[in-house]
Amino acid sequence: MRENYDEYKEMINEYLLDFMPSIDSKSSVLYDSMKYSLMAGGKRIRSVLLLAACEFAGGNAKDALPYACAIEYIHTYSLIHDDLPAMDNDDLRRGIPTNHKVFGDGIAVLAGDGLLTTAFEIMNKDMFLFFDNMKELKKRINASYTIVKHSGVQGMVAGQASDMDSEHKQCSNEMLEYIHINKTGSLIVAAIRAGLYLGGADEEMMKDLTCYAENLGLAYQIADDILDIKGNVEELGKNTGKDAECEKITYVALNGMEASEQRLKELTINAVEAIEKYYDNAEFFRDLVLRLENRTK
């Protein structure tokens, strides 16, 4: 298993465009719009986690690339749609103008649609290669189903809907955690579980790493809430203060900065404890969640 986050990230960046389907030149603006957001940079944390989880479970990261790239396509589509005027109305993403600011609202919607459906195409195309190997095919079906389920109305999309519906309203901590767990955490859980399926993890490892992923996912969003106040545009690549401007409910808005930092610390400890028994083999995952917490300091 690789220890360096950037090694996984470089793999993703190297192969990401290879999975783009051929688009007729008459629709070249669609390709340009999809590529614009896909190659705008970013941490690639979900796709990196998928590759790392696959290798952690004993698999080969290169075999998991179609699923890692698919989850990156899905995440990028969600960002394009999140930034639209009808949703968060942002004009900066990953340090460059948001997709709709460059290509217009309509093409941005279609670019998101294109990336989402291409993700399904990528995974299905890979599964076609394993019809004569039921064991490997089952791994890929499980990985694909996990990604699709956590991306949709039982995961990310449900969280986005509740997030929008909660604007300008009083919100409980229960609802806030539901939003965070689904809108942000769900795709992180999907990445790790899909990688574990592809690597052939047993039930115990699946349970432990799912616990880690659930804590990491919620910690990731609370850190994002903190950085929306304490961070800066240059480091984050997006505008800060947007949550307060849009009267969005965040962990900081509901609980205050001190309680938010304490909750982030608790989640970090929980994540580390979930993988403690794997000792040095889990160093990659341990370092990642600790670095996440340190970003807010």
Image: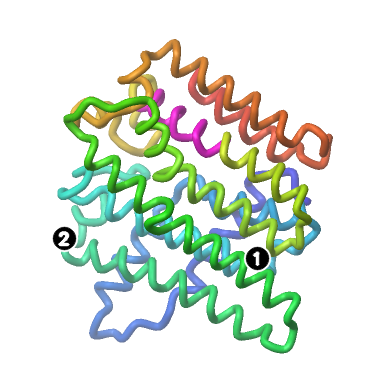
Q: Main secondary structure of the magenta part?
A: helix
220 in magenta: yes
Type of the residue with mark 2 = Gly
What's the mark number on residue 104?
2
Judge the density around disc 2: few (<14), some (14-19), many (≥20) Cα neighbours within 10 Å: few
Write the residue at 71% across / 42% down: 208
- Residue at 40% across, 26% down: 227
x 46%, y 69%: residue:
119
Q: Amino acid at mark 1?
A: Ala
Q: Secondary structure at mark 2?
A: loop
Q: Is residue 186 left or right of residue 127?
A: left
> Magenta residues, as a range?
216-228
Q: Indicate whether 286 appears above or below 185.
A: above
In the rendered image of this protein, does residue 178 appear above or below residue 259? below
Foreground: 136 or 7? 136
What residue sits right under mark 1 in the picture? Answer: 64
Q: Residue 135's spot in the image, x, y percent? A: 75, 76
**Element marked by disc 1:** helix
Please state the horizontal and vertical placement of residue 53, each as a whole percent of the image.
Answer: 69, 52
Q: Position of residue 269 (x, y in %)?
A: 65, 24
Indicate how the structure is coloured in the image: rainbow
Q: CA distance from mark 1 to mark 2?
A: 34 Å
Task: State left or right for residue 274 relative to residue 102.
Answer: right
Above or below 134: residue 12: above
Q: Nearer the viewer, mark 1 or mark 2?
A: 1
* Residue 242 placement (x, y as % from top left): 24, 31
